[in-house]
Image (spheres, grey):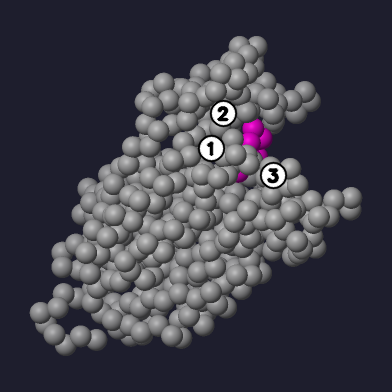
Amino acid sequence: MSTDTSVETLLAGAAQIDITPPAGTHLAGAIGVHRPARLALDPLHARALVFESAGRRLGLVALDVTIITEEYTAIIREKIAATCGIEPDALMVHATQTHSAPTVGHLMVDPDFEGIPDELSWVGGGDLAYSSIAAERAADAVALACERLEPVEIGASSGIEGRFAFNRRAVRQDGTVGMPPRHWPDDLGPTWIRYIEGPIDPELGVMCVRGYDLHMRAMLVNHTCHPVHTFPSLSVSADWPGAWAARLQQLYGSDCVPVVTNGACGNINPWPPFEPDYANDQTLMGEGLAETTAKVVKSIEFTDTATLDYRVQRLPIPIRELTEEEFTWAQGILSGSPTPELVEGDPGRVTSDWAIASSIWSVHLMRQRSPMLDYEIQVLRIGDVAVVGLPGEPFVELGLAIKLASPTLPTWIAHATSQYVGYIPIPGAFARGGHEAETRYWAKLVPEAFDLIRDAATDLLAEVFA
């Protein structure tokens, strides 16, 4: 504890609020499929962590949802600015991206897309009744964290954890890319894969926030992997982020708030591509991450002072222009079926062609409105730690490039922040194709986006840590 009265005391507060949806709420993560929630395997939470020093406040709230749109991020930020004195740009709003939860806002079609009746609103990907509730509770969590501000000591470090995350883009014999299945069928073995396209990010980041009584008040932890263990069942689950947080509370006390952030996981899954009989278990992953966390915690040194700072840049990035073939095909499908075309005998599923056509057309509508997307890059500085907020699902290579160029260590990436953007692949992925690279509403930025974001984030970090 510092005895220098000229040094500003570091304050922190944390809180978590349940955001588990009621039965029947549409769960996101699938394309053109209605997934009404039937069972809660574990609760969903909004977890908030707020810091204050020298009159400056900044914070982060992580929601166990699939995505959050710009509209609802603005609602949370505006409420907190009015009630807690945290500037909108100083609050990071992050979705852990569990695929066994609802979204906060729509993600499958553009707001200007017409023809979806109210009874089929799930086609848009979201459940707006739930969205309003989740946004309100997320703001409540931040407000409660502000009420709990107290003098604290913090420390941070990172460990290596490479057992649970795998690059999911497998290059075939013909050079194209596919996603390895969870379990190989008998007639299809790993020889289908020539090689895996890219790396993973094995860093496991840990920041501890403890009171002067040495009890842990909160933790900010970071790892990189799609939370898809429980998908595509109709069960609600926070997946491995929830299992990790639950185990940390067992280890460090029920009053400890573990805020889990998920890194640049656009091409990272928990399915090992060469182990067809692996155990698909989010609890196993969460407990393994907690085991590594405990080892990192033992090496952490604490301080009761920290520089707090933040920056936001809204970077204009071009939206892809449809090819003539894409435009004509999507227009033809939607001209024949301007409203969602359901699979015969299945009122909870739209046809594959209609789902893809509506997604492609949404890119066209978005580009008509503006050829550029204002992409929000956010940097929070907490002492020597940088947390970089990147909207969408950036490929892991983007997160690694920013970490390598960062002037501070550790630097952690939080993907799926502030607005819905979709995938941000490496430039070379476009020639090989695959789910993440084809022109869709979930993959709508030009290939140059990768370099633009990397450079802008690097400049922002240099400014914050000058």
Residue 223 inside the magenta-drawn segment:
no
Q: Residues within 10 Å of mark 3 (few under 14, many from 20)?
A: few
Query: Is the Cβ of the residue at disc 1 closer than 8 Å to that at disc 2?
Result: yes
In the displayed structure, 402 sits above or below 249; it is above
Disc 1 element: loop
Disc 2 element: helix
Which residue bears the numbered disc 2? 359
Asked whether residue 140 is in view, the answer is no
Q: CA distance from mark 2 to mark 3?
A: 26 Å
Disc 3 element: loop
Which image quarter is the C terminus in?
Answer: bottom left
* Rendered residue at 47%/60% (across/down): 400
- Mark seen at residue 175: 3
Residue type at mark 1?
Trp
Which residue bears the numbered disc 1? 442
Circle nearer the N terminus (1, 2): 2
Residue range of the region highlighted in magenta in the rendering? 29-36
